[in-house]
Image: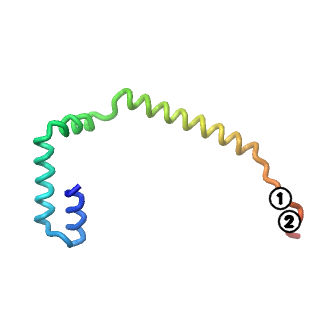
Amino acid sequence: MQHTRAACLTRSNIASPLRLDQAVKDVAAARATSPRLRPTTSRRKGGPTAEQRAIANAQVQAAAATLAVLERRLDQTMVRVPADSLSP
């Protein structure tokens, strides 16, 4: 969070580049020492798991089915206009 804030402030010339450098170093140090962050990072590099892909594929199929139903309903839609609203 501080890294993002420091980067934004540095781009806006509100904070010095030294502050951004320190924030980058802090993030790197936290990642190197935190055992909880290391597995998360390595999982991200590997891409989605088979389960995540299956879920995504099921969501795509559900969205396609919903689209088909809505397109069918749209095809059956009839718009009616009162006769007195027609222009001569």
Query: Total of numbered circles in the picture?
Result: 2
Residue assigned mark 1: 81
Residue 31 coordinates in the image, percent (x, y): 15, 44
Quarter of image, res 66: top right
- Residue at image position (83%, 58%) is 81
- Residue at image position (24%, 71%) is 12
Quarter of image, res 46: top left
Residue at the bottom extreme of this rendering = 13
Quarter of image, res 64: top right
Q: Nearer the viewer, residue 14 or 76?
A: 14
Q: Residues within 10 Å of mark 2 (few under 14, many from 20)?
A: few
Q: Is residue 44 positioned above or below 21 on the image? A: above
- Residue at image position (61%, 40%) is 67
- SS of the residue under disc 2: loop
Q: Is residue 62 positioned above or below 10 on the image? A: above
Q: Is residue 62 positioned above or below 2 on the image? A: above
- Residue at image position (13%, 48%) is 28
Q: CA distance from mark 2 to mark 1?
A: 8 Å
Colour mode of the rendering: rainbow
Quadrant of image for the C terminus? bottom right
Q: Amino acid at mark 1?
A: Val
Q: Amino acid at mark 2?
A: Leu
Left or right of residue 57, residue 87 in this image = right
Query: Mark 2 near mark 1, Cβ–Cβ under 8 Å?
Result: yes
Q: Residues within 10 Å of mark 1 (few under 14, many from 20)?
A: few
- SS of the residue under disc 1: loop
Residue assigned mark 2: 86
N-term-proximal mark, 2 vs 1: 1
Residue 56 coordinates in the image, percent (x, y): 44, 34
